[in-house]
Amino acid sequence: MAKPTSDKQGAFTSLKFSIFRNLIQILASPINNFNPKRSFFEEPHLRTHQFPFVFNDSIDSDLVLRDVGMSPVKPWTQDEKSTILALVSQLSHCAPGLLRLASIGSPINLLRICRLVLGNKSEPIAFSGQRTILLPDAFFFSYGQIHNFAHEITHIADDMELAAFSKQWLEIAAPVLQEYRVNPQSIKDEAFSKTWPSEYACHSVIEALAEYVAAFVNGRYFASKVKFEETVAPLIISPTPMVNEWKVLVEKARQAKNAKNYIQARLYYRKASKLFPENPRTYFQLAGIATTTADYCEIVKNTQKMIEAFEVVDSSRLLYPTMRDCILQILKTYIQTQEFSGADKYAHWLLKRFPNDTTILELEKYCQNKLLNSVE
């Protein structure tokens, strides 16, 4: 039940909704109307479109979040909606580019749940994936809600890791994460707080970016501030027109792929890869699309480009486990098509590059056994 409000509280709520109406004027626009030759704020027709969030009281049947356990969805109260509106208003002032980047594509679903538990038994204050943000009770009782909200908005804005898997970001993040892995006690040094936002930001380059951006837009800066502003911010906080165009293309590709329009999805991902050829995620998507038709040549070509892109951006090899996961996912998807001859050939091709990978070897043997059984 919503907490009753006094007359003063009601007036304050009205004020927040007044701010909200003004906020709508600067937020998201349909991706089909985007002109990549001009920035968002130079396009007058982009200032009069819908609020990019939806307060949902039910879970979309297509939503699949791996290793995420959550209690049933609960209805939103008016006070909770007002809290979110206030947070969005704050972000629209301190990081409008970030908010606009996140808003490109389908609406962002906001789900209100009682409790959230990840596979590692941790209970995060919020979680995001597939243009959905899960907000448990803990979020509304937490300190630093604007930081936590900005963290999840960063994940939505960078869900294809254009910034997180960029050479610019890895030059900043890799030394810190590598130091932490060698010496976890380094976070206790006084200098750590001047270098990095939190211990949680040491877990992966993706979480590191979300934590760094959330701190940055809320006025907390680190020793790498100047370099971050010059090299990484244009990819996420103050996105350039080319970044906005790339985001439009990958969102169109995602929608086409979800509709099983693979020809159109391939076209959009190829256009996106030409804008930022060093982003490995676009090639991963293209290889995945190629598995739908068991197109061996396309799978190999895009896997090779993906590997090369990872190597270009990541001299530290910090992303090697991520690259391997991508390769295994492509191979497993290929196997699911039942085209065992092509999948076996693909596994053999992979083993030439990763000869000591036992998982690839096991999958190759699985394909060979299937081929032998089909002959018998």
Image (cartoon, rainbow, N blue to C red):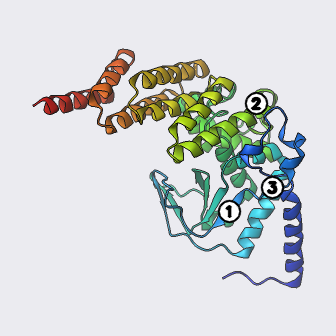
Q: At x 78% / y 63%, what residue is drawn?
A: 85
Question: Mark 1 — residue?
Answer: 54
Q: Are marks 2 and 1 in contact (CB under 8 Å)?
A: no
Left or right of 360? Residue 273 is: right
Q: Is residue 223 visible?
A: no
Left or right of 167? Residue 369 is: left
- For mark 2, give the secondary structure: helix
Image: 118 above or below 97: below
Q: Dividing the image into 4 quarters, which one contains the C terminus? A: top left
- For mark 3, give the secondary structure: loop
Front in this rendered view, residue 225 or 292? 292
Q: Which mark is residue 242?
A: 2
Question: Mark 3 — residue?
Answer: 49
Q: Please state which amino acid type lies under the numbered disc 3.
A: His
For marks 3 and 2, the one nearer the N-term is 3
Q: Quadrant of residue 1?
A: bottom right
